[in-house]
Each structure stands twice: as C-alpha cells, then as structure tokens.
Amino acid sequence: MAKEQKPEIREKIKEQGIISEMRESYLAYAMSVIVSRALPDVRDGLKPVQRRILYSMYDSGLRHNSKTVKSARIVGNTMGRFHPHGDAAIYDALVRMAQPFSLRYPLIVGQGNFGSIDNDPPAAQRYTEAKPSALAEEMLQDIEKNTVEFRPNYDNSLEEPAVLPAKLPNLLINGSMGIAVGMATNIPPHNLSEVVEAMQHLLKNEKAKTEDLLKFIKGPDFPTGGTVFDQGQMLSAYSTGKGSVLIRGKAEIEQRQAKKKTVSGWDIVISEIPYEVNKASLIAKIADLVESKKVDGIRDIRDESNKDGIRVVVELKTDVQPQRILNLLYKYTDLQKAYHFNMVALVNGIQPKILSLKEFLEEFLNHRKIVVTRRTEYDLARTKDRIHILEGLATALDHIDEIIELIKKSKDKLQARENLMKKFKLSEKQAEAILAIRLESLAKLESEKIYAELREKKKLAKELQAILDDPKKVIQVIDAELAEVKEKFGDSRKTQIDSGQIKEFKDEDLIKQESVIITLSQEDYIRRLNPESFRVQKRGGKGVTGFETKEKQDIPLLAKVCQTHDLLLFFTNTGKVFFTKAYEIPESSRLSRGKPVNNFLNISADEKVVALISYQEKSSQAKYLILATEKGVVKKLKIDQVLGRRRNGSRVISLKKNDSLIGADFSSGQDQVILISQSGQSIRFAETNIRAQGKASQGVRGMGLKKDDKAISLNVIEKNKAKTQKILVITEKGFGKFSALKDYRLQTRAGSGIKTAKLNEKVGRLILGKAIDNEEELIILSHSGQALRIQLESIPVLSRATQGVKLINLAEKDRVATAAVL
C-alpha cells in the first residue's frame, strides 16, 4: 500500500497539464539558447561567451601590449566569474577568435598551436597562451564611462556588460554562425574599410538604399580569399537577409617545367580555398575522385602549404586538357561551393530578427549614438566636477593669505573646512580640495597651471555640451571615430568579386569534344569506341578483332560515328524513340563487349533498337525528322515533336503488323530522300512529297517493294549537296562501291525505283546504302567481330548496275554486319 503524503507536502503540489508544462519549459529552453548561447547581438556582434572572454581579459588587466598569459587562466577566470559553463566551450570560442582563417579580423592574439585550416585540433589550454588583439580593445574602449548597461553575473557577486561599446562593426567585419532552437544564423565577414565607408555614407544619407550601400561594400570578404560571383544574387541576399552566393577557390593552371627547362605538362595550383572548407578534406576528396575514376587525368597531388600560405599542386597527366580537369574539380569538390546568407541577429539583446544590410548598419550606428551620448554625458559630468574643484582652488589662490590665516586659527580640519565654506561660500568638495592643496602649488608657475586647466576644462565642457545639444555633432563624432578605425585597421580585400553569374557546368563542359564510334549489338550491348582503336588499312584486308565473342556470338547490329556531345536518338521496332548523350555511354576498349543498353535507356524486354542517329543540339539547322520502315513507308514529323525527352520513350510512328523501323534522319524541309532496298533497288524523291504528320500517324508509302524485299537504308540529302554526294553500297560478303548521285534521277514517291547494285551469290544481299559527302574513312564490322578501317578514297566510283570491289577479306562463313563512316 502506497505511503500517504503528509498534508504540508500535498499543499505544495500544484497540478499542471503536461502540454502546457512542456510548452512553457520548451519555450524557456529555446529562449535561453537563442539569447544566451547561439545568436550574436547586432550591436557588438558577439555571443555571450565571446563577450565574457573579452571582458574577463580586460577586467584582469590584459591588454594587446601585455605579455600573453596561459589560455587556461583566461578560461578559468571567465568560467569562474562570468560564464558558468564547461571550460571546453569557452576554450573553443577563444580558439576561434584567435584563428586568422576563421575570423577576418581576429580578436585574440594566440601563441602556440591554435589549430589549422586542415581541421587539426588546437593544443590543450594549458599549453597555449593568449591576449586581446588591438582591435579587440577598440571593442571595449570607454566601457568604464557608463557607455553600456551592466547586469549581475550568474551568482550576483559581480557585474558584467550586457553589450560592449564596440567602436568597430564587429558583426559585419567578422561575421557569425550559430544554430539555435528553430533558427540559425550565417553572416559572412566583410572588409572593414568598405563597411566603414558604407556607414559614413549612411550617416550622411539616411534614405540610402541597399543598392547604394553595395557601391561601398562589394560583397563578402573571407579570410581565406577566393572569388565570389553574381552581383544580382548578392543584392537579393543583402536586401532580404537571405540568399546564397557561389565562392570559388583560387586555382591557376601552370606549366610544369622538366629538369632540362622544357615543358613536361601542366599543374593546377590551388592557392586559396572557399571559406570554412577543410583543406585536408578537399585534398582527400580529390584523391577519392581519382581512385573512383570519376576524374581521370590526375597523376599526383601534393600539399606544399606552409606558414606563408596555401599551395596545393595537382599534377596532371601529359595528354589531358587542364581546364577540363579544373572544371571537374569545381563541380565535384568544395573548391567551389555555395555560401548561404541567413542574417539573423539579436536586436536590443533579446529579439531575434532577419536583417538587411542597411538594417545591420542602422542598428550599429544607433548603438554608437547611444554610446557616444552616454560617454559625452559621463565626460561632461566629470569635467563639471573638475571645474567645480578648480574654481574653489582659484578662489583660494585669489585669497591665499586670508585662507592661510583662517586655517591657522581653526582648531582642527573639520572647523577649518566649515570656516572656509562659510566665509568664501565654498562647497564641501571645494573646501576639502583647498585643505588638501600642497604648499608647492602656491608657487607662481604652479598657480598658473590651475588657472590654465580651469580655462581648458570650461572650453571642454562647452564642447561636450554642444555635442549633447546637437544630434548632428554626435554624428560628426561617430564619423570621425569611424575614419580613425579605418586608418588604424583598414586593409585591402582578400576575396575577389565577380559581378557576373558563374557559368553552370554542364556534363558536356567537362567532356572532351571528339569523334567516337557507338556500336549496338544483336544482344543489346552498347559501347563507345575511340576511332583510333582501329588503324587504317588497305582495302581488301582482314582488319583486326573488333570485339570478343567468347560464350555466345554477338553480332554488331548498328554503328554510328558522332561527337561525344551529340544527342543520340535510339528508335525501336515498336516505333518509339529514346535519348541519351554520347558521353553517357562509357568508353570501351576495342575488345570489350560493352554494357547492356537498358543501363542507359528504359527499354522494355519486348523492344529492340533498330535505328540510331545523332543530333548536334547547338549547331543543327534541322526542322523535321524523316522515318522509314522495312515495308517502304516514310513519315515526316516536326523536330520539336520529337526532342522532348521522356524516360519511357516517346512514340513517333504507329507501325502496321510485321513492319519495323529501319532508319531515321533529319531534314530542313527542302531536301531529298533516298530509300535503298535489300535487293538493290533505290528511289530518290523530293522531301516536299511528304507532308508533316502527328506522332501517332502511320506515314505514307515511299517505295514500292516486291514481296520478299525490304528497305534497309534511309538517306536525306541536302538540296545544295546533291551534285557532290555519292552513294556507297556494301554487301554482306564484303563487296562495295560508290555511285554518283546524279545517276539516281528524281522520281515520284511510292515508285519501285531503279537498280543501285548488281547482286548475286558472290556478293550476297545488300547490307548498307549510304549517301557520302566529305567523310574520309569507313569502318566495317563483321559477324565474327572483325573490324576494318579503310580510306574511302580507295573505293572506286562505278556505275549503278555493278557489283563493286572487295572491301574486306572475310572468312568463308563470316558476313558483314554493319558499317560506319568517319
């Protein structure tokens, strides 16, 4: 049985709903984190721990010209007197304020190991020493003159400043970062000279806009240098307090000199990195990219950094384009990264608020107006006190003999003071000062000093009162002090500003533009080959092995020569088109089988790729796409109906039963079309005979075919090239020839055509019929994997009705599978 509570205990228990209790407790915790830990004050730009460290050093007598003292001593004083939290948190804050790569203008001078840009940890606090920097002292200047409010420390034994007088706009020049509850802040550092100039402009032009202030503040100025891009993005970020800009490290391409002073290659030398980037991690990332072969062409990476600065050398292989490698580093590493503005600070020490650049400057200037006013009031009060004393001393000097006589007749000090006050109408303070005067002060020169000081103090009091009476004079004082700060601590920018937008890296920007061969096999394996894999041989040779067929013979089905940046269009037997870039297909060796095509195209199991063409997006003048099927059907579509990429393909033609696509090509709308059949027939007609149709239509008859015949090739001939082009035909047994295009008369669409080759058992059926213009070489691929590369000029021009000459020497049962021209 539970023990019953005593009545007096029950009376102290207060029932509270768990929801309201959690809400109140969480809000109290959140506000504590926001105000007392994570967010900086807009006035002095410091978080509580930073403010307490600086004040603790000041209160202990540490100055920038003092000797450094143990960091542990500073941490202990701060923790014991003002900041009742862990010493690790205090030391971490102290270390950051001493790091030149973290703060644009460090507030602490450190001696010893204070960490590195490689994220090496600092030495323990018992091994390092520190003191405030000269700039930090400007943050505390005049704090003894009642310029800021003080409040009790955590145990009410001492008082600490709620904010520092801050002669410097610390929040903007050093920036800040922190994560609170439900909010965060990320303010970049800026150049002190630029910020001061902007504030001076704002003092004289209260209605100045953010755009006007950005004429002075060019953008962030990070301690690690680099380049910031896009003035438009910066204007947006500074106007709203939120946004992002791109930072890029400084990397230069340098020629590498060999021992004999000859150029042996290229190096990328990194001398500046983006803010808050770990240099060691950056180097490790580059090494990972090389190991994973995501970036190919780097031979070595060396970190040659020292106390004078950063120097990371990326040594490149001799056969690579250095700019391409540098672009890859920008894309895949933190050598280029976004900096996100989230300019949140505490206003009046308690209200978190997102501020624009102008609001930051206004809040700081308002703080300085209060500080200057309170300091002037303090100085005026002290000056008036001194004037009061000096006036008493002047009275004493004017009646010195009487005063001496009066003092001599007084029985004690108390009576002497009262007699002085009564006879000469002095205040108690004046009488005390007269009684304390030394005899040496009665000398003529010493007396003159008192009169001179009185005149000087009266003049000063008048000036101080004038400042208090005229707000414009307060502004003049602030302006003069800002100019003084700029003179003492101003420097040139470390971060360069590029007002233009940074060029976005597309994949093709990182890929070398070069000719490649794309092949697709009967078993749906695709590969990208370098044409140099096949040496040029004489017509009639055997060629070289073009691919391996170890377990199962895999016959080449299609071959296309294109550029790495070209868009490839794959047409399937079901009338769909799929897209990919040529460079997206991995480069393979000559003997490699390649990769399954469904790794790159979302083709279903019942579809087969039957045609392949390439499209140069930047330079093509094409307006239409011409399609042809085995049964001689042709179709014309507008190009913009085709090029919309879809993951599951796009239908371009509705096919009749037992029909299949055999070819596709682009046209201008005024070109000519040639269809060639397997039996050696061909037809040439004007493209204008075909009207453009929709994607779901079936097309029209282009060529009349016999029952056992089928179309194998489609060619679109530009009208202005009709006189120069030739028709190349190749048979399955390796025979081929050229025929002049002029021998193919223009006919009406849907006719049976004319003969383009004489076919018999010796040469076999026709495999390829292609219109050739300025191409120079031909690559022939056979069923067994043989590949022959020959000069096109070695192929003779013969009449249409001939069988041609032997182009490739095939084994008895081998056959030509496909061919492509370079």
Image (cartoon, rainbow, N blue to C red):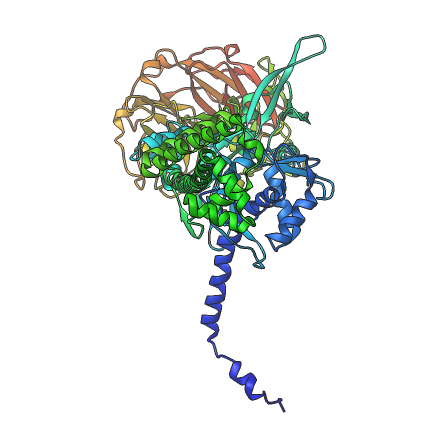
Give the residue at the far right of this rendering.
127
Q: Position of residue 639 (x, y in %)?
A: 33, 31
What quarter of the picture does the N terminus occupy?
A: bottom right
Residue 699 visible to the viewer: yes
**13 lies above or below 642:** below
Residue 228 visible to the viewer: no
**806 lies above or below 113:** above
**544 lies above or below 159:** above
Q: Position of residue 217 (x, y in %)?
A: 41, 29
In the displayed structure, does residue 809 sit left or right of residue 676? right
User: Could you say which is closer to the camera, residue 81 or residue 454?
Assistant: 454
Number of dots carrying numbers? 0
User: Could you say which is closer to the camera, residue 551 or residue 391?
Assistant: 391
In the displayed structure, does residue 206 sit left or right of residue 646? left
Q: Residue at x 59, y 39 (%)?
A: 97
Q: Position of residue 31 (x, y in %)?
A: 48, 58
Give the residue at the far bottom of this rendering.
1
In the displayed structure, does residue 92 sit left or right of residue 494? right
Q: Residue at x 51, y 57 (%)?
A: 32
User: Could you say which is closer to the camera, residue 75 or residue 339?
Assistant: 75
In the displayed structure, does residue 554 sit left or right of residue 632? right
Q: Position of residue 381 (x, y in %)?
A: 43, 42
Q: Residue at x 51, y 61 (%)?
A: 29
Q: Quadrant of residue 538?
A: top right
